[in-house]
Image (spheres, rainbow, N blue to C red):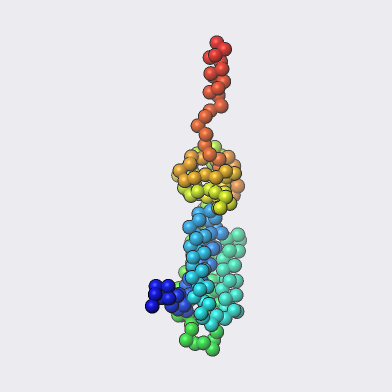
Amino acid sequence: MDIGQAIFDVISSPNVAYLMLVLGLLALVMAFAFPGTGFLEIAAALCLILAFLGLSRLPVNVAGLLLILVGIGLFIADLQIQSGLVALGGAIILGIGSVFLFRPDESAFAVSWWLIMLVSGGSALFFGLGLHRALRVMQMRPALSQESLIGAQGVIKSPVSAESQFIGTAQVAGELWTVKSDEPLSVGTPVVVVHVEGLTLFVRALAYQPASLPEKKEEITNG
């Protein structure tokens, strides 16, 4: 048996395929909350590809899959509403969809109950409490220090390019921020904040050429 077939057999296990599916969808939710990092998007794509390869060999129940997607959708909605109850509802629907992910008449293909409870309970705690509080803290910072951030300098930590829709991350004021620019910026490029919108900082490359220098030279020449 070659390595490819061995991997295919592993991801075709109901528990592994289910875990890859949920991890991929949750990574998408995190990418929606913290866009531009690149890592979350890649992790989501990889997990979902492995999940769909595994599920292609399993008796998937469409209704269960749709319930899982609805649960994930409620997690995304909770990022906007931030009520906590919406995330709890999403976790419950995610759990119900997980139970019925595979057709009932195929009892050999079933997700372990402990895995379903772990995923559903962990998602409820993470999205309903942890991420909810983290987003509240992050949303308070720009509102309180928006004016002070304009003109602040930083360094690009993940590249800003056309492939990422000119969105990346930068270390500004000692913290990692999502940044956007009109030009491509490579890692390590010094930048300056020109505008703040929500949790996103609009930056441009920092130029170390003060405009006053030519005027001074001109004055010396005239003198």
Above or below residue 30? Residue 17 is: below
- Looking at this rendering, what residue extends furthest in the front direction? 2
| Residue visible at 57% across and 43% down in the picture | 183
Residue 12 in view of the camera? yes
Q: Nearer the viewer, residue 207 or 27?
A: 207
* Total marks in image: 0
**Which quadrant does the C terminus fall into?**
top right
Residue 179 in view of the camera? no
Please state the horizontal and vertical placement of residue 88, each as a whole percent of the image. 55, 69
Please state the horizontal and vertical placement of residue 99, each as a whole percent of the image. 52, 80
**Which image quadrant is residue 78 in?**
bottom right
Q: Nearer the viewer, residue 123 or 223?
A: 223
Q: Nearer the viewer, residue 44 or 137?
A: 44
| Residue visible at 53% across and 67% down in the picture | 25
**Which quadrant does the N terminus fall into?**
bottom left
Position of 11 with respect to 105 (left or right) is left
- Looking at this rendering, what residue extends furthest in the top direction? 223
| Residue visible at 53% across and 56% down in the picture | 34
Please state the horizontal and vertical placement of residue 123, each as a whole percent of the image. 50, 68
Please state the horizontal and vertical placement of residue 31, each as a whole percent of the image. 53, 59
Above or below residue 215? Residue 103 is: below
Q: Nearer the viewer, residue 12 or 1?
A: 1
| Residue visible at 47% across and 86% down in the picture | 108
